[in-house]
């Protein structure tokens, strides 16, 4: 087998298989091969890459999904992993679509410099926070759906039910509905409605318990991973958890606070033309992180005298409330980035015990 001194790899990832490709420093295609997406397959893929020369970098598609474990294995072996986005539709239309084509495209993206992002390491406390928050977010959405269904049923329920529950706050309403004792005749609409409401109320109670348990588990992990972040004005466990999940276990992968601002969708986009000099809303980035920054800004605008003074000054200068909030979110993003990348924060980001 011919080898070269240095090679660049590219991997197109899928649920059951990964397709790898190798190119040389001038972009010539050397070889490609498919491997199973298993622990053994990852080791074989790495050995195959190294059989062609010294591995400079490997571009991997989907490091946050199908390629997450492969990225961890390669990084643990000392290989530089680059996160590669899928080719855009224009490229797909002109070049076609297949696993070898996508694998070579990933390698070419690394060689050309189009792909430069370092993936999240996903091997520390922050990853634990992320997965627990995913479960909590699902439970919260389910609870909201259940509450909406309860309200919908009560709107059209017989008056005996509507009048009994009218004006009740949520907790009292759920307790009352969970204690309903419907008759056995489900062909009666009133009985069927009582049965449905009791089941939905008990489901809501179970979700309340699940959410409380998850919050109790997440809170100390957030405090362990980012004690300094929680000390910032307006930052609570929920917003801190989201910002941590966005930054990852290795926030140093973001080369500047401007990069973090782009990641969080708060970097202003120039929209100037002629004599008009303005910026527009950035609709890209992690919208959940953007929402967390928005929440922090709202708290500060309401309770912190410094942002309130800033709002008054900028309002007199002619800026709208939305424009002022965008400025404040950018300031908060800078503060969060400096906190996350401070040396003392990096020492806190430890891998949890097995």
Image: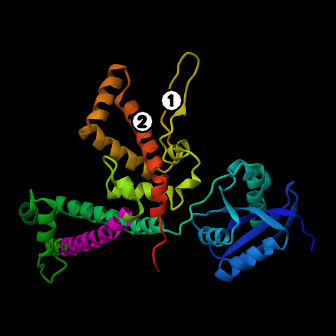
Q: Residue at x 80, y 75 (%)?
A: 48
Residue at (34%, 48%) from the top-left corner?
Answer: 232
Which residue: 18% across, 58% down? Answer: 155
Q: Is residue 180 magenta?
A: no
Residue 89 against residue 149 in the figure, above or below = above
Q: CA distance from mark 2 to mark 1?
A: 10 Å
In this rendering, is residue 350 above or below 252? below
Q: Residues within 10 Å of mark 1 (few under 14, many from 20)?
A: few
Circle 2 Cα neighbour tier, 10 Å, few/some/many (<14 / 14–19 / ≥20) = many
Residue toward you, 214 or 166 = 214
> Residue 267: x and y, percent?
51, 39
Tell me where residue 147 appears, x and y as whole percent.
24, 63
Quadrant position of residue 170: bottom left
Disc 2 is placed on an element classified as helix
Q: Residue at x 43, y 48 (%)?
A: 336
Badge count: 2
Query: Which residue is the site of mark 2?
Result: 326
Mark 2 and mark 1 residues within 8 Å of each other at the beta carbon: yes
Predominant secondary structure, magenta span: helix
Q: Is residue 332 left or right of residue 146?
A: right
The answer to whether residue 131 of the structure is visible from this angle is yes
Q: Which of the two labelled residues, at mark 2 and mark 1, occupies the earlier sequence position?
A: 1
Residue extending farthest to the top is: 275
SS state under label 1: strand
Which residue is situated farthest in the right direction here?
A: 2
Image quarter where the N terminus lies is bottom right
Dot 1 corresponds to which residue?
279
User: Of residues 7 and 11, which is closer to you in this image?
Assistant: 7
Region rendered in magenta: 195-223
Q: Position of residue 274 (x, y in %)?
A: 59, 17
109 left or right, relative to 183: right
The spot of residue 84 in percent (x, y) is 67, 57
């Amino acid at each position: 087998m011919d080898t070269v001194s240095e090679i660049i790899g590219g991997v197109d990832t899928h649920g059951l298989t990964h397709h790898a490709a190798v190119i040389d420093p001038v972009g010539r295609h050397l070889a490609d091969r498919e491997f199973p997406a298993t622990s053994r397959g990852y080791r074989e893929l790495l050995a195959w890459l190294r059989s062609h020369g010294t591995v400079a970098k490997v571009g991997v598609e989907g490091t946050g999904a199908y390629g997450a474990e492969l990225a961890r294995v390669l990084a643990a072996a000392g290989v530089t992993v680059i996160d590669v986005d899928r080719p855009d539709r224009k490229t797909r239309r002109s070049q076609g679509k297949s696993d070898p084509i996508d694998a070579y495209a990933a390698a070419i993206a690394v060689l050309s410099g189009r792909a430069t992002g370092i993936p999240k390491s996903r091997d520390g406390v922050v990853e634990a926070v992320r997965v627990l928050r995913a479960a909590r977010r699902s439970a919260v959405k389910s609870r909201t759906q259940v509450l909406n269904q309860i309200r919908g049923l009560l709107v059209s329920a017989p008056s005996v039910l509507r009048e009994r529950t009218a004006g009740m706050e949520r907790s009292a309403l759920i307790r009352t509905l969970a204690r309903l004792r419907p008759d056995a005749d489900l062909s009666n609409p009133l009985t069927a409605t009582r049965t449905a409401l009791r089941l939905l109320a008990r489901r809501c109670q179970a979700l309340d318990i699940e959410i409380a348990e998850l919050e109790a588990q997440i809170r100390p992990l957030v405090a362990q991973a980012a004690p300094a972040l929680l000390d910032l004005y307006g930052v609570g466990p929920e917003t801190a958890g989201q910002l941590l999940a966005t930054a990852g276990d290795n926030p140093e992968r973001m080369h500047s606070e401007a990069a973090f601002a782009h990641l969080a969708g708060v970097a202003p986009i120039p929209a100037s033309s002629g004599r008009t000099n303005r910026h527009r809303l950035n609709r890209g980035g992690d919208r959940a992180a953007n929402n967390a920054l928005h929440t922090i800004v709202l708290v500060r605008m309401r309770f912190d005298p410094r942002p309130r003074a800033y709002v008054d000054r900028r309002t007199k200068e002619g800026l709208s409330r939305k424009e002022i909030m965008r400025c404040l979110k950018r300031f908060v993003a800078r503060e969060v980035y400096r906190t996350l990348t401070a040396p003392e924060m990096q020492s806190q980001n430890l891998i949890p015990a097995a």
